Amino acid sequence: MTDTNRLPAEVRSPGPGSVALVTGGNSGIGFETARQLLDHGATVWIGARDLDKGHRAATELGSSARVVQLDVTDPSSVAAAVQQIGELDILINNAGVNPGGEDITGATLEQLRTAYETNVFGLISVTQAFLPALRRSAHARIVNVSSGTGSLTWNSSQNPQFDWERVKGGGLAYRSSKTAVNAVTMLTAQALGEEIKVNALAPGLRLTNLIAGMTAGGDPAEAATGAVRLALLPDNGPTGALWSWDGTRAPW
Ligand code: NAP
């Protein structure tokens, strides 16, 4: 019997005809996801809001990675990327910002707007723009890089992975934006049915630019393995769920 709480062990073998885009692919989890998708044989576009950073990342990958200028908050940049990329099979909505860890007593509307512009509206804008191309794909997959800190269940039931006393109530802008990402993931999956598999990833705490200054955190490459499993789901794989990086189902 299929275990619906665990991702299937097998992945699709993409081949160079399979085209992937990783937004915010120039650093951190996105960069490692691009690296691993290339290793699997896919054609990979690194979306970078700063082209120089994108080209530096592609050089570091030392492979055939392609680079596209893509600021997810800029509709003209998104439209130009759609034109440049053309066909697309795998969309990794990874670009994200964390504008501050304040709770309701300190968070500013500016921080909330910044978080939502990139993490939520940017993700929706990119998804909508690439839907026509994804609909033409036989194995379309969307992976929304969310966060366990956006899980309402984990936020309300003292997830042992969290240092509860430290995090409770905090990070209003970032964490609530990731809760919104989870909702958008579920509703997008419901709207697209089996046509396009849409899942969210909880990557775990990772040492990247996003959490600059923190010393605890794992290797972003480990989180990328989870993104890649969702990107290369077999055709009988799940849709419309939140997954931890290790392939176990996480609660909304
Ligand atoms: P990161 O290294 O800072 O990567 C974030 C990427 O997003 C960078 O490439 C950044 O570009 C890009 N970006 C930011 N705003 C953008 C915009 N408007 N348009 C296009 N790209 C934009 O941090 P990361 O940890 O790998 O973050 C990747 C994802 O994982 C994010 O969605 C984050 O919320 C999520 N996540 C991370 C952790 C963690 O512990 N690190 C935990 C849970 C979830 P620049 O280089 O130009 O800034």
Image (cartoon, rainbow, N blue to C red):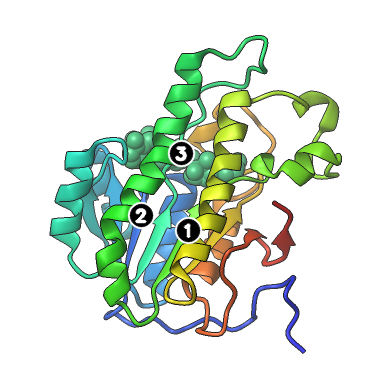
User: Which residue is at 36% across, 78% downward?
Assistant: 41
- Front: mark 2 or 1: 1
Label 3, ligand 1: CB separation under 8 Å:
yes
Spatial CA span between label 2 and label 1: 9 Å
Q: Is residue 180 above or below residue 116?
A: below
For mark 3, what is the residue?
119
Q: Position of residue 235 (x, y in %)?
A: 50, 84
> Element under label 3?
helix
Q: Position of residue 241 (x, y in %)?
A: 62, 62
Q: Position of residue 173 (x, y in %)?
A: 56, 26
Spatial CA span between label 2 and label 3: 12 Å
Q: Earlier in the sequence, mark 2 or mark 3?
A: 3
**Marks 1 and 2: in contact by CB < 8 Å?**
yes
Neighbours of disc 1 within 10 Å: few (<14), some (14-19), many (20+): many
- Residue 127's label in the rendered image is 2
Q: Is residue 88 visible to us here?
A: no
Q: Quadrant of the N terminus?
A: bottom right
Q: Earlier in the sequence, mark 3 or mark 1?
A: 3
Q: Which residue is situated farthest in the front direction here?
A: 191
For mark 1, what is the residue?
188
Spatial CA span between label 3 and label 1: 15 Å
Residue type pointed to by label 2 = Thr
